[in-house]
Image: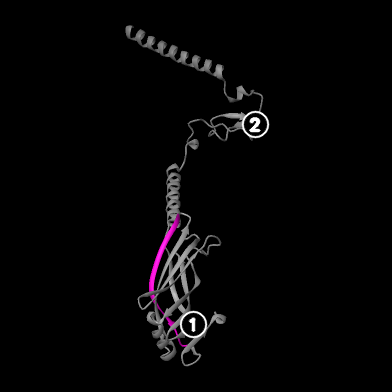
Amino acid sequence: SRGINAEYGGYLRARVCCSGMIQRFKERIGAHGDSSRRYGATEPSEQCRTCKGSGKIPRKYSEGVAVISLGDERLAPSRSIIYICIAVLVFVASTISLVIVLYPRPLTGVSKSLQIVQATISRNETRLKLGVSVEVHNNNFIQSYVDSIISQFQFQSREVGTNETTYETDRPSVPGRGGRTLNYTVVTSYGRESGSQDIYTYCCVVRWSLNFKVTVSSKFSYFLSPSIEYSDEKFLFANCANVKRLDDRTCYLNMTETL
Protein backbone atom coordinates (compact mmCIF):
# COMPACT_ATOMS: atom_id res chain seq x y z
CA SER A 1 0.00 0.00 0.00
CA ARG A 2 2.93 2.29 0.63
CA GLY A 3 4.04 1.90 -3.02
CA ILE A 4 0.55 2.61 -4.28
CA ASN A 5 0.35 5.77 -2.19
CA ALA A 6 3.68 6.99 -3.54
CA GLU A 7 2.65 6.39 -7.14
CA TYR A 8 -0.67 8.13 -6.57
CA GLY A 9 1.07 11.07 -4.92
CA GLY A 10 3.36 11.50 -7.93
CA TYR A 11 0.36 11.42 -10.24
CA LEU A 12 -1.33 14.16 -8.22
CA ARG A 13 1.77 16.33 -8.24
CA ALA A 14 2.14 15.97 -12.04
CA ARG A 15 -1.50 16.84 -12.51
CA VAL A 16 -1.20 19.89 -10.30
CA CYS A 17 1.90 21.00 -12.24
CA CYS A 18 0.14 20.62 -15.59
CA SER A 19 -2.89 22.46 -14.24
CA GLY A 20 -0.63 25.33 -13.16
CA MET A 21 1.00 25.51 -16.60
CA ILE A 22 -2.36 25.52 -18.32
CA GLN A 23 -3.57 28.26 -15.99
CA ARG A 24 -0.53 30.44 -16.69
CA PHE A 25 -0.95 29.89 -20.44
CA LYS A 26 -4.57 30.98 -20.22
CA GLU A 27 -3.59 34.08 -18.23
CA ARG A 28 -1.02 34.98 -20.86
CA ILE A 29 -3.57 34.55 -23.64
CA GLY A 30 -5.98 36.69 -21.70
CA ALA A 31 -3.39 39.44 -21.15
CA HIS A 32 -2.14 39.66 -24.70
CA GLY A 33 -4.75 37.95 -26.78
CA ASP A 34 -4.25 36.57 -30.25
CA SER A 35 -4.49 38.55 -33.47
CA SER A 36 -8.19 37.94 -33.92
CA ARG A 37 -9.05 38.99 -30.33
CA ARG A 38 -6.96 42.15 -30.53
CA TYR A 39 -8.73 43.29 -33.67
CA GLY A 40 -12.10 41.93 -32.64
CA ALA A 41 -13.29 38.35 -32.93
CA THR A 42 -16.22 39.30 -35.07
CA GLU A 43 -14.12 40.88 -37.85
CA PRO A 44 -13.13 38.63 -40.75
CA SER A 45 -9.38 37.95 -40.78
CA GLU A 46 -6.82 36.14 -42.91
CA GLN A 47 -3.28 34.86 -42.61
CA CYS A 48 -0.54 37.47 -42.57
CA ARG A 49 1.38 37.05 -45.83
CA THR A 50 4.54 38.80 -44.63
CA CYS A 51 5.13 36.89 -41.39
CA LYS A 52 5.17 33.36 -42.81
CA GLY A 53 1.56 32.72 -41.81
CA SER A 54 2.25 32.92 -38.08
CA GLY A 55 -0.44 35.53 -37.39
CA LYS A 56 -3.75 36.92 -38.54
CA ILE A 57 -4.80 40.44 -39.42
CA PRO A 58 -8.20 41.92 -40.27
CA ARG A 59 -9.00 41.47 -43.92
CA LYS A 60 -9.62 45.18 -44.44
CA TYR A 61 -5.97 45.87 -43.47
CA SER A 62 -4.46 43.01 -45.46
CA GLU A 63 -3.45 45.16 -48.44
CA GLY A 64 -1.63 47.86 -46.47
CA VAL A 65 -0.15 46.07 -43.46
CA ALA A 66 3.21 44.35 -43.44
CA VAL A 67 4.37 42.77 -40.21
CA ILE A 68 7.98 41.57 -40.23
CA SER A 69 9.91 40.64 -37.11
CA LEU A 70 13.17 42.39 -36.38
CA GLY A 71 15.14 39.19 -36.62
CA ASP A 72 13.68 38.17 -39.98
CA GLU A 73 16.40 37.07 -42.39
CA ARG A 74 14.86 39.14 -45.17
CA LEU A 75 15.89 42.31 -43.31
CA ALA A 76 19.54 41.28 -43.18
CA PRO A 77 21.89 42.90 -45.78
CA SER A 78 22.49 40.69 -48.77
CA ARG A 79 25.62 40.61 -50.99
CA SER A 80 27.28 43.35 -48.94
CA ILE A 81 30.79 42.06 -49.63
CA ILE A 82 30.15 41.99 -53.37
CA TYR A 83 28.90 45.58 -53.37
CA ILE A 84 31.87 46.76 -51.29
CA CYS A 85 34.34 45.03 -53.63
CA ILE A 86 32.66 46.57 -56.68
CA ALA A 87 32.79 50.06 -55.11
CA VAL A 88 36.49 49.65 -54.27
CA LEU A 89 37.30 48.44 -57.80
CA VAL A 90 35.40 51.35 -59.38
CA PHE A 91 37.24 53.85 -57.14
CA VAL A 92 40.66 52.36 -57.92
CA ALA A 93 39.93 52.23 -61.67
CA SER A 94 38.69 55.85 -61.67
CA THR A 95 41.77 57.04 -59.79
CA ILE A 96 44.17 55.23 -62.13
CA SER A 97 42.32 56.59 -65.17
CA LEU A 98 42.54 60.17 -63.88
CA VAL A 99 46.26 59.79 -63.19
CA ILE A 100 46.86 58.41 -66.68
CA VAL A 101 44.84 61.16 -68.36
CA LEU A 102 46.08 64.14 -66.34
CA TYR A 103 49.74 63.22 -65.83
CA PRO A 104 51.91 65.81 -67.68
CA ARG A 105 53.66 64.48 -70.76
CA PRO A 106 56.27 66.22 -72.95
CA LEU A 107 55.39 68.70 -75.68
CA THR A 108 57.81 68.92 -78.58
CA GLY A 109 58.72 71.53 -81.16
CA VAL A 110 60.79 70.22 -84.08
CA SER A 111 61.94 72.07 -87.21
CA LYS A 112 60.70 70.21 -90.28
CA SER A 113 61.67 72.24 -93.33
CA LEU A 114 63.69 75.28 -94.38
CA GLN A 115 63.13 77.39 -97.47
CA ILE A 116 64.63 80.50 -99.01
CA VAL A 117 61.75 82.97 -99.28
CA GLN A 118 63.67 85.97 -100.63
CA ALA A 119 67.29 86.31 -101.65
CA THR A 120 69.66 88.88 -103.06
CA ILE A 121 73.05 87.26 -103.58
CA SER A 122 76.35 88.72 -104.73
CA ARG A 123 79.98 87.94 -104.06
CA ASN A 124 80.43 90.74 -101.54
CA GLU A 125 77.03 90.95 -99.87
CA THR A 126 74.11 88.55 -99.50
CA ARG A 127 70.73 88.95 -97.90
CA LEU A 128 68.51 85.90 -97.29
CA LYS A 129 65.03 85.67 -95.87
CA LEU A 130 64.56 82.14 -94.57
CA GLY A 131 61.27 80.46 -93.71
CA VAL A 132 61.26 77.57 -91.25
CA SER A 133 58.35 75.28 -90.40
CA VAL A 134 58.16 74.06 -86.81
CA GLU A 135 55.93 71.11 -86.01
CA VAL A 136 54.69 71.10 -82.41
CA HIS A 137 53.17 67.94 -80.96
CA ASN A 138 51.18 67.49 -77.76
CA ASN A 139 51.51 64.07 -76.11
CA ASN A 140 48.95 64.91 -73.41
CA PHE A 141 45.26 64.07 -73.52
CA ILE A 142 44.28 67.69 -72.83
CA GLN A 143 44.84 70.79 -74.98
CA SER A 144 48.07 72.73 -74.42
CA TYR A 145 49.37 76.13 -75.57
CA VAL A 146 52.57 77.50 -77.12
CA ASP A 147 54.14 80.30 -75.07
CA SER A 148 57.22 81.05 -77.16
CA ILE A 149 59.46 79.63 -79.89
CA ILE A 150 63.05 80.70 -80.54
CA SER A 151 64.72 79.70 -83.82
CA GLN A 152 68.48 80.11 -84.24
CA PHE A 153 70.28 79.67 -87.57
CA GLN A 154 73.95 78.88 -88.11
CA PHE A 155 75.83 78.81 -91.39
CA GLN A 156 79.39 77.49 -91.52
CA SER A 157 79.48 77.37 -87.69
CA ARG A 158 78.52 81.04 -87.46
CA GLU A 159 75.21 82.26 -86.09
CA VAL A 160 73.57 84.23 -88.86
CA GLY A 161 70.06 84.91 -87.52
CA THR A 162 67.57 84.44 -84.70
CA ASN A 163 63.81 84.59 -84.57
CA GLU A 164 62.18 84.89 -81.15
CA THR A 165 58.39 84.82 -81.02
CA THR A 166 56.64 85.22 -77.66
CA TYR A 167 52.88 84.91 -77.40
CA GLU A 168 51.41 87.20 -74.76
CA THR A 169 47.87 86.77 -76.08
CA ASP A 170 46.22 84.53 -78.67
CA ARG A 171 48.58 81.69 -77.90
CA PRO A 172 48.51 78.89 -80.49
CA SER A 173 46.68 75.88 -79.09
CA VAL A 174 47.79 72.30 -79.62
CA PRO A 175 45.02 69.68 -79.39
CA GLY A 176 45.38 66.71 -77.09
CA ARG A 177 47.30 63.83 -78.66
CA GLY A 178 47.73 65.94 -81.78
CA GLY A 179 49.93 68.54 -83.37
CA ARG A 180 50.10 71.54 -85.66
CA THR A 181 52.64 73.35 -87.85
CA LEU A 182 53.82 76.91 -87.17
CA ASN A 183 55.78 78.96 -89.70
CA TYR A 184 58.43 81.59 -88.90
CA THR A 185 60.80 83.73 -90.92
CA VAL A 186 64.19 85.27 -90.22
CA VAL A 187 66.33 87.68 -92.26
CA THR A 188 70.05 86.91 -92.43
CA SER A 189 72.88 89.04 -93.87
CA TYR A 190 76.36 87.97 -94.97
CA GLY A 191 79.51 89.82 -95.96
CA ARG A 192 82.37 88.64 -98.12
CA GLU A 193 84.23 87.29 -95.09
CA SER A 194 81.15 85.75 -93.43
CA GLY A 195 80.02 83.48 -96.28
CA SER A 196 78.67 85.64 -99.08
CA GLN A 197 81.25 84.30 -101.55
CA ASP A 198 80.33 80.70 -100.70
CA ILE A 199 76.60 81.38 -100.97
CA TYR A 200 77.14 82.98 -104.39
CA THR A 201 79.06 79.91 -105.53
CA TYR A 202 76.47 77.41 -104.22
CA CYS A 203 73.36 79.22 -105.41
CA CYS A 204 74.38 81.16 -108.49
CA VAL A 205 77.10 79.00 -110.01
CA VAL A 206 76.64 75.40 -108.89
CA ARG A 207 72.91 75.68 -108.09
CA TRP A 208 73.35 73.57 -104.98
CA SER A 209 71.70 73.75 -101.56
CA LEU A 210 72.72 75.72 -98.49
CA ASN A 211 73.14 73.76 -95.27
CA PHE A 212 71.97 75.49 -92.08
CA LYS A 213 72.03 74.29 -88.52
CA VAL A 214 68.65 75.16 -86.99
CA THR A 215 68.02 75.13 -83.23
CA VAL A 216 64.44 75.45 -82.01
CA SER A 217 63.70 76.16 -78.34
CA SER A 218 60.03 75.98 -77.35
CA LYS A 219 58.01 76.77 -74.23
CA PHE A 220 54.55 75.37 -73.64
CA SER A 221 51.80 75.65 -71.02
CA TYR A 222 49.80 72.74 -69.63
CA PHE A 223 47.23 73.22 -66.90
CA LEU A 224 49.08 70.92 -64.46
CA SER A 225 52.51 72.19 -65.52
CA PRO A 226 52.65 75.93 -66.33
CA SER A 227 56.03 75.79 -68.09
CA ILE A 228 57.34 72.95 -70.26
CA GLU A 229 60.52 73.53 -72.29
CA TYR A 230 61.81 71.58 -75.25
CA SER A 231 64.83 72.05 -77.50
CA ASP A 232 65.62 70.52 -80.89
CA GLU A 233 68.66 70.85 -83.10
CA LYS A 234 69.17 69.59 -86.65
CA PHE A 235 70.68 70.43 -90.04
CA LEU A 236 68.32 71.54 -92.81
CA PHE A 237 68.96 72.25 -96.48
CA ALA A 238 67.65 75.32 -98.30
CA ASN A 239 67.29 74.61 -101.99
CA CYS A 240 68.82 77.12 -104.44
CA ALA A 241 67.27 75.59 -107.54
CA ASN A 242 64.81 78.47 -108.00
CA VAL A 243 67.41 81.25 -107.71
CA LYS A 244 67.61 83.36 -110.87
CA ARG A 245 70.57 85.30 -112.16
CA LEU A 246 69.97 89.05 -112.38
CA ASP A 247 73.32 89.87 -114.01
CA ASP A 248 76.87 88.58 -113.98
CA ARG A 249 77.35 89.63 -110.37
CA THR A 250 73.97 89.18 -108.75
CA CYS A 251 71.32 86.49 -108.27
CA TYR A 252 67.89 86.94 -106.77
CA LEU A 253 64.84 85.01 -105.62
CA ASN A 254 61.35 86.11 -104.51
CA MET A 255 58.91 83.36 -103.47
CA THR A 256 56.73 85.49 -101.20
CA GLU A 257 53.74 85.22 -103.46
CA THR A 258 53.93 81.42 -103.56
CA LEU A 259 54.05 80.92 -99.79
Along the line of sight, the residue nearer the viewer: 149 or 42? 149
Q: Position of residue 172 (x, y in %)?
A: 53, 64
- Numbered label attached to residue 61: 2
Question: Quick one: label 2 or label 1, which is nearer the N terminus?
Answer: 2
Q: Position of residue 5 (x, y in %)?
A: 36, 7
**Nearer to us: label 2 or label 1:** 1
Along the line of sight, the residue nearer the viewer: 223 or 185? 185
Residue at left offset 45%, top offset 46%: 87
Q: Secondary structure at mark 1?
A: strand
Q: Residue furthest left?
A: 2
- Numbered label attached to residue 130: none
Residue at left offset 44%, top offset 65%: 218
Q: Position of residue 24 (x, y in %)?
A: 49, 15
Q: CA distance from mark 2 to mark 1?
A: 102 Å
Three-letter amino acid code of the residue under disc 2:
Tyr
**Which range is magenta?**
225-241
Main SS category, magenta section: strand
User: What residue would you read off at disc 1?
Assistant: 119
Image quadrant assignment for residue 110: bottom left
Is residue 127 located in the magenta-colored stretch of the structure?
no
Query: Is the residue 50 above or below the residue 135 in the image?
Result: above
